Amino acid sequence: MLRQLTPHVFVMKHNHDTDRPALGLIAGETASLVVDGGNSPAHARAFLQGISALGVAAPRYLALTHWHWDHVFGAPEMGLTTLANRRTQPHLLQMAGYTWDDDALAHRVAQGEEIAFCAENIKREFGAQRAIAVQGADILFDQTLTVELGGLTCQLIHLGGEHSEDSTVVYCPQEGVLFLGDGLCQEMFHGEWSYDLADYRARIDKIKDLSCRFYVNSHWDVQGADEFTAYYRRLIALGELAGESTDPADVLGRYRRAHGCDPDEETEGDLLSFVHGNRKRQAAKKGSQQ
C-alpha cells in the first residue's frame, strides 16, 4: 500500500478515480511527519493503516501543501499537529463554515467559488451522505519552517504560484526527497487550465538547486532527478515556443515548423495551457487599464 522511496520516506500513490493525491510519510527516529491529509477520512484511514505496518516512529506532525479540498478533508482524521503556510489558514477557516450537499456545491460552482471538476470528485469520494469537517492548522509559518524528527529534518518551504498562492513544498535533505504537492500544476480555477511561463519559471527557480533523488507530485508518478529536470525543461521550452501568442493555431503551427510533426496529445495540451495563460494575462492587463 505504501511504497518505500528511501530508508525513511514512504508514499501512498495517487488515485485519479476520486482525485486522491499522493500522501507521504517521513519517518525520523523519534517522530514521523505526514505530508497532506488526504481527500476524505477514508483516504486518511487507509494511509494510517498502511503506516501501522511499517514499525516506524508514530506520526506527530501533518504538513499541508495547500488548502485545496483533496489535501485537507482527511486532516481531522489524522489527529496530528497540523503545519501550514499562513496563507493557507484563511481558506481552511472559510471552508469550515461551508455545507457540502449537492445544492451547496452547485451554488458555489455557479458563483465561481468552486469548479465542477472538484465538485464532481467530492461527490464520487463521499457519496450522497457527506460528513465533511475542515479545521484550521495548529502551527503557521510565512516562508520556511524546519521540523526535527530525530536524525532527520523536514523543511516546509513556501512556493506560491498560480495554482495556489499558499503552495508549500516539503523537503527532506537527508533523504533527498521533495514533496511538491500541486505546486507545479496549472491555474485551474478561472477559466481554461493554464500556465504562465514567468510564474512557472519562478517556481522552478525556488527548488531546482535542492539536492534531490526523488520528486513527489501529488497527482503524478514519482520522478527521479533526471526525469524531473527533463520534464520542467521541456515545459519551459514549450512556453518559450508559445511566446506571447493567444492563437492556438499559431502556436501549433510553430511547433510543427520547429519539429516537423504534429504534437502528441500531452504536448498539445501543454502548449494550449500556455496560450490560455497568455489570454488570461492579457485580459488582466486590459482590465487594469480601464
Image (cartoon, helix red, strand yellow):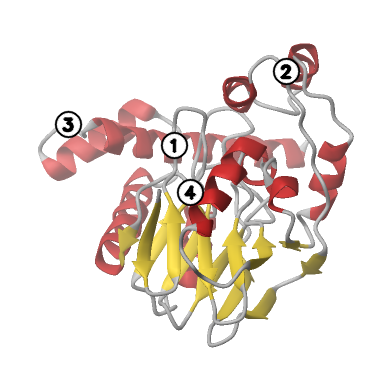
Q: Which residue is mark 1?
A: 15
Frontmost residue, 31 versus 34: 31
Q: CA distance from mark 4 to mark 2?
A: 24 Å
x, y percent for residue 51: 52, 58
Which label sits on residue 22?
4
> Mark 3 and mark 4: span between their CA atoms?
33 Å
Camera-nearest label, 3 or 2: 2
Q: Reading the chain from its start, which is encountered first: label 3 or label 2? A: 2
Q: Secondary structure at mark 1?
A: loop
Residue type, label 4? Ala
Indicate whether 64 appears above or below 29.
Answer: above
Which amino acid does the dot numbered 1 rest on? Answer: Asn
Q: Name the residue at 53% across, 28% down.
A: 192
Q: CA distance from mark 3 to mark 2?
A: 46 Å
Kindly check if marks 3 and 4 are in contact, taking CB atoms under 8 A apart as contact: no
Q: Which mark is residue 262?
A: 3
User: Which amino acid is tagged 3?
Assistant: Asp
Image height of 262 relative to 223, above or below: above
Q: As drawn, is 99 to the left or to the right of 166?
A: right
Q: Nearer the viewer, mark 1 or mark 3?
A: 1
Comes first in the chain, label 3 or label 4: 4
Tell me if I can see residue 225 in this picture: yes
Q: Residues within 10 Å of mark 4 (few under 14, many from 20)?
A: many
Element under label 3?
Answer: loop
Residue nearer the viewer, 226 or 276: 226
Q: Earlier in the sequence, mark 4 or mark 2?
A: 4
- Label 4 element class: loop
Q: Which residue is mark 2?
A: 129
Residue type beneath disc 2: Gln
Q: Position of residue 63 (x, y in %)?
A: 65, 62
Assign the C terminus to one quadrant of the image: top right
